[in-house]
Amino acid sequence: MSLVSLNLPDDIASHLASLAKATGRSTDALAQEALSEYIRRESWQIAEIQRAVAEADDGDFASPEEVQATLEKWTGNAH
């Protein structure tokens, strides 16, 4: 396991310590979980952006009919 050192603003450190105490978990465990979730979410978002850019580069765009169908699906408004 690697050791990473970082400076936290006092308010974040205080919230982290309070959460650790309330949950009976260590601040290390909570910080690892938070960082892991952040990395997972950001990695997914970057991969999706890269996929969308590749589709756009290939000219793969939604047709007006597909856009309308999606709009109707989410709004319930048929036009």
Image (tube, rainbow, N blue to C red):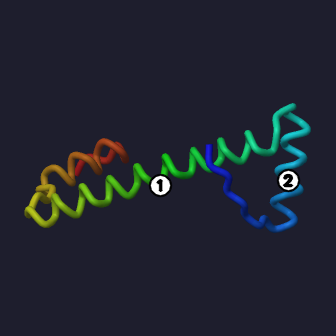
Q: Disc 2 marks which residue?
A: 15
Residue 73 spot, x, y in % from top left: 30, 42
- Compared across the picture, whether 30 is left or right of 70 comes to right
Residue occupying the point 43% across, 52% down: 43
Q: How many numbered discs sit on the rendered protein?
A: 2
Crowding at dot 1, Cα within 10 Å, few <14 / some 14-19 / many 20+, comes out as: few
Residue 10 spot, x, y in % from top left: 87, 66
The numbered disc on residue 42 is 1
The numbered disc on residue 34 is none
- Type of amino acid at the residue the image marks with label 1: Glu
Which element is circle 2 on?
Answer: helix
Which comes sooner in the sequence, label 2 or label 1?
2
Residue 55 spot, x, y in % from top left: 16, 58
Residue occupying the point 56% across, 51% down: 38
- Type of amino acid at the residue the image marks with label 2: His
- Figure quadrant of residue 28: top right
Asked if the residue at tag 1 contacts the one at tag 2, i.e. Cβ–Cβ closer than 8 Å, the answer is no
Residue occupying the point 36% across, 45% down: 74
- Compared across the picture, whether 58 is left or right of 37 comes to left
Which element is circle 1 on?
Answer: helix
> Residues under labels 2 and 1: Cα distance?
23 Å
Q: Residue furthest top?
A: 24
